[in-house]
Amino acid sequence: MVILFQLALSCSSAAPTSMADPFNQLPKDEQQTLQLLLAPTGQLSGDGQLRELMNEQRSHKQSVDGGIWYLSPDLAQQQLGSNGKEALMISEPSQALWLQLRFGGKLDTISLKSEWLQSHALKLPPKAPLAKIGLR
């Protein structure tokens, strides 16, 4: 019983960790395995809903990234060699599956340095184009 009590004490005295922004706790050069959602340009970001979702995730999780990172077509070309594609990197596999069902695309895994994610993939997708509304 003493061992269990000591174990409980050591667990309870450990520094609290925040799941809201796990990359703040990692060394900058540490590789992270993430879910990768790759789709043709515009399929993920074309209607503005992905941008809205990412803003909500960042606000809800009170973190700079919300566990979702966006790669523009230019970044996807540079990092992945995928021409004419845009991509998402997602920290939670269940969320990645939901995003694939919602937006389509191909789901895979990728390993990236946390420093690269924080310096290159924090931008939000483009805003939705304005609807063409006019009077006749």
Image (tube, rainbow, N blue to C red):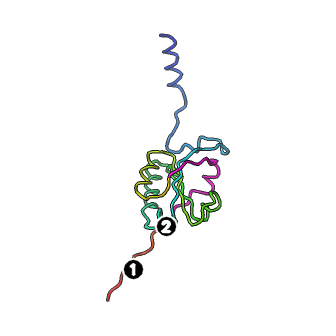
Q: Residue at x 63, y 60 (%)?
A: 81
Reply above or below: 135 against 30. Answer: below
Q: Are marks 1 and 2 in contact (CB under 8 Å)?
A: no
Q: Residues within 10 Å of mark 1 (few under 14, many from 20)?
A: few
Judging depth in this view, the residue of 70 and 21 nearest the camera is: 70
The kind of residue on which mark 1 rests is: Lys
In the image, what residue occupies the spot 60% across and 52% down? 117
Question: Counting other residues with Cα less than 10 Å from the Cα at mark 2, is it few (<14), some (14-19), or many (20 or more)?
Answer: some
Residue pushed farthest right?
Answer: 29
Helix, strand or loop at label 1? It is loop
Q: Nearer the viewer, residue 118 or 100?
A: 100
Q: Which residue is tagged 1?
A: 132
Image location (x, y in percent) of residue 75: 61, 61
Q: Which of disc 2 and disc 1 is earlier in sequence?
A: 2
State which region is magenta: 107-127
Residue 64 appears anywhere in the view: no
Residue at 49%, 20% (x, y): give it.
Answer: 8
* Residue of label 2: 42
